[in-house]
Amino acid sequence: MNYDFKEIEAKWQKYWAENQTFKAENNSDKEKFYVLDMFPYPSGAGLHVGHPLGYIASDIYARYKRHQGFNVLHPMGYDSFGLPAEQYAIQTGQHPAITTKTNINRYREQLDKIGFSFDWSREVRTSNPDYYKWTQWIFIQLFNSWYNNNTNKAEDISTLIQIFEKEGNATVNAVSDDDISVFTADEWNAFNTKKQQEILLQYRLTYLAETEVNWCPALGTVLANDEIINGVSERGGHPVIRKKMTQWSMRISAYAQRLLDDLNTIDWPQPLKDSQTNWIGRSQGASVTFNVLASEAKQSHQIDVFTTRPDTIFGVSFMTLAPEHELVATITTPEQKAEVDAYIQATAKRSERERMADVKTISGAFTGAYAEHPFTKKPIPIWIGDYVLAGYGTGAVMAVPCGDQRDYDFAKHFNIDIPNVFEGVDISEEAYVDKEKTIIANSDFLNGLPYKKAMKLAIYELEKIGHGKGKINYRLRDAVFSRQRYWGEPFPVYYVDGMPQMIDAKHLPITLPEVEKYLPTETGEPPLGNANVWAWCTKENKVVDNSEINNETVFPLELNTMPGWAGSSFYFNRYMDPNNTDAIFSDDAINYWQDVDLYIGGSEHATGHLLYARFWQKFLFDKGVVPKNEFAKKLINQGMITGTSAFAYRLLMSWCNVDFSDHEHFHSGEYFTNELFISKKLWDNIPDNRVKENEEEWNNYVEKMIKPVLDIPFNKLKLIVLELNSIHVDISIVNSSNEIIIGEWKDKNPIYKEAVFLDDNGNVMKNSDSYIVGREVEKMSKSKYNVVSPDSICEEYGADSLRLYEMFLGPLEQSKPWNTAGITGTHGFLKKLWRLYLDDNGAKFTDAAPTKDNLKTLHKTIKKVAEDIENFSFNTSVSTFMICVNELSSQKCTSKEILEALAILVSPYAPHIAEELWQQLGHSTSIATAPFPKFDASHLVESSKEYPVSFNGKMRFKLELPLDMSKDEIEATVMAHEKTIAQLQGREPKKVIIVPGKIINIVG
RNA sequence: GCUCGAGUGGUGGAAUUGGUAGACACGUUGGACUUAAAAUCCAAUGGACAUUAGUCCGUAUGGGUUCAAGUCCCAUCUCGAGUACCA
């Protein structure tokens, strides 16, 4: 019998599906274990070999836990709302639901072929109304909640209303908007409903707020910072403006401290915890209020700043506001107005990213206004500068140049006074940033105090005069929750008199309406503005035609949709009871499964998904919906698989027969474009990318290399555009010597049909010639033409080979290059494994008792593999299996007892072949729950050890000695050995080190 | 700049507490089987010198601790990831 992987894999995949082998029970006496993968976005490109890496690892772990007798929950689903499907819809008119469904089917097919032990009966899709019903439900819960700092948890909004009714809001200790006005109980009770709603919105955990966004009018959408390049959109190059928009926000800042603290309670990778810690960005200090001097401005104003160094308050010599700060226009004096306006305009042109990247340029403008120092009452000039960001803190800083390098540089640059408040410290060259090692001086009541004491006293004194208080500031900002997109969850929200109203949870889901176009409306409203049936009837409690809107019983619905992270922030809980229509999940289900025991996914989600999901989990915990404060006990980051891209090197040149500077004739000129692909060697010899700057070198190059081969009337032409690019070449046409046949590539890419290729000597190459491509390791991605799909490997070598190979590549957490060359190794191993059990005559195994060697090999393997799985070191267990099979083969082992155990050991890694062998061994049920072999150390006991004998730490020879030999006996034996005598050449050893069972080292 | 991670043969990587560096594979070379190929099996494979024995060098670089360092300490370099004037 041959190892026919195709037949075997198809057979067992069918068996598992039909017998629901991996269905997890919500009622079980077994201990639970929940293994989760980050669910994928089903893109049109299908799975590539990078996706399954984490899935294979988690699958091995899940299968291992089943062998250990756990009731394992191992689900899979799809994060199926998202931009690519919408983009495709805009281009083709195809409904995103259709694209998404097609893509999901393809993913499912690919996943099935790899033999994962998912419980598919629990599949979720975030774009499915049965699922997003609960996304909407959670949104409503958030809307109906506020964060009570006294109880330190979210509470129902009704408890807040009760307080307002009885005592107003003065005593409320809540996380809220900053601009809260104080009112009494009587005032509250006298407010009309709308006013009350407005106030409550300032406390709700999800709320409407004006947010400044990057608005791209041409695309009709908001862009993220990294979608903007040089002030225009990456896609299409349209202008982008800053615009205030009313959007839903999530008050994640309420949870900042808990998100930080609870990192200590979860077993997640330290780098991931670090990046969440940095993202939350807790800093302790004080908020200080400065009065703007009334003589300079018409009325008095106050500027609040946050500082981490209130101890240096006597070192303040100026203030800096962000150019966007709301007071700038008010306080600027007429004399300074022109300069300030010019500066604001100049900064507005720079993107936030640009401003942040450029540390060296110091710029700013004086407003002409002064603030009053809270203690000394001295006037302090108020400047604006773009090193202060509007979005952080209050958008204003008290500048202490002696203690902060940026303030110092700013002061030097603008010749502002730099008072020194540190005892015995030289600040003539740079600021003194160290906090701990100094004593405060020139600071009135703070003189002679160290940092910590000075800080406390400064805060105390500030509080006493009503000019500040101790404060903890977080970098973490509330999360914007509105998206101007079609393909996302609709909000369960309608508007009465401009105020948002929640639709009662019993009428959910509010399903996504049909639209004709997926683009924003002509008036700039989100795509849902195109829907004709998108109004809420409060009488019938259903969505009705827009024409019925009367703002009495029928009201307009929210036009934004939710962001991608909404659906992924609780899916791990929904898997516990995914088909429940009455509740997000049953109490029984959540109480049994509790939380995720092992979560595997990429580290790129550190500050997105993984932070938002923790936030929602904590909220649901506060509301008593889930029993755990954190959703995943342990998390492992899988490294990405990189691909080896191939490049051809292109010189793109445009020529024109009129002078570029001759504007008059320029447009009537004739143009020629040449695409020249040059060999790697020529490319490397190009005088750098400086060619454009260094005209002489470039001219030499053209003279030598290009003129002779191109049919261009050079005397009439001027080079106007020159670009050097490395162009991705599809790796499927590159041979193992890194060559492509030029003609073959041109056939695949007709746009390069006319391109000329030059070899190392600058000679023109023929279409039948081979061009050597350059190779570089990059992230695997379709756009880089370097993806390898798992399909062809499954086809050629089978899923078990693929699974083993992906694990064999290296440690799970490390990123590693994909190279299929080694796949024959794991495939060969499986064949060898097979031959241990079966040959042309059928079964080889017998009831023969295992030999001592057989047992030793087996138990060595059991020990190592179990340890490896616990440590997520899957690559080393593949090697261990190879060694085991090599040994058993050379031992000619036929013992059924040994082979049965081996089949179970291999089964988490290569489940198809394991099932088949298990059946061949005579079993009629699946191997999936066969108990994992028990390790017995007695089989590994050795009686002797081959000692390495070293001289001065260098191993010279080996000596087999009994393990029970005493140190003295060992020393005597070694010293008498002829090789020892030869090594010493008569020298007397100074010392002999013997570590029994380990090593012998002779010094001297 | 900061934070984190990494650097070992031609390649992927192994070395779990400081104790035989290079396991296991790929690749390469030679051989067996075959009309031939594939498949399979055997042998060699860090570098240099010597080709029997052996010697020297060798885990990014330079120091250090130690009987003994890929592993620990100090400094430096390179690469990757994240982050970004955070007051």
Image (cartoon, grey):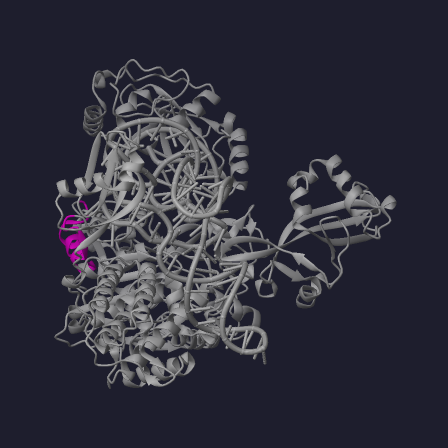
Give the magenta part as a residue range: A150-170
Quarter in which the C terminus of chain A is drawn: top left
Q: Position of residue A790 (x, y in %)?
A: 46, 69
Residue A157 lies in the magenta-colored region? yes
Q: Is residue B6 above or below residue B38?
A: above
Q: Is residue A116 above or below residue A969?
A: below
**On the image, which quarter does residue A196 sit in?**
bottom left
Q: A481 left or right of A423?
A: right
Look at 23% across and 78% down and name the residue there: A896
Q: Position of residue A791 (x, y in %)?
A: 47, 73
Looking at the image, can residue A560 be seen? no
Look at 43% across and 19% down and name the residue there: A416
Can you name the residue that lies furthest to the top here?
A: A424
Q: A530 left or right of A884?
A: right
> Foreground residue, A986 or A68?
A986
Look at 15% across and 61% down and name the residue there: A937
> Foreground residue, A88 or A601?
A601
Look at 28% across and 28% down and name the residue there: A309
> Foreground residue, B71 or A30?
B71
Looking at the image, can residue A755 be seen? yes
Quarter in which the N terminus of chain A is drawn: bottom left
Q: Position of residue A501 (x, y in %)?
A: 31, 65
Residue A851 lies in the magenta-colored region? no
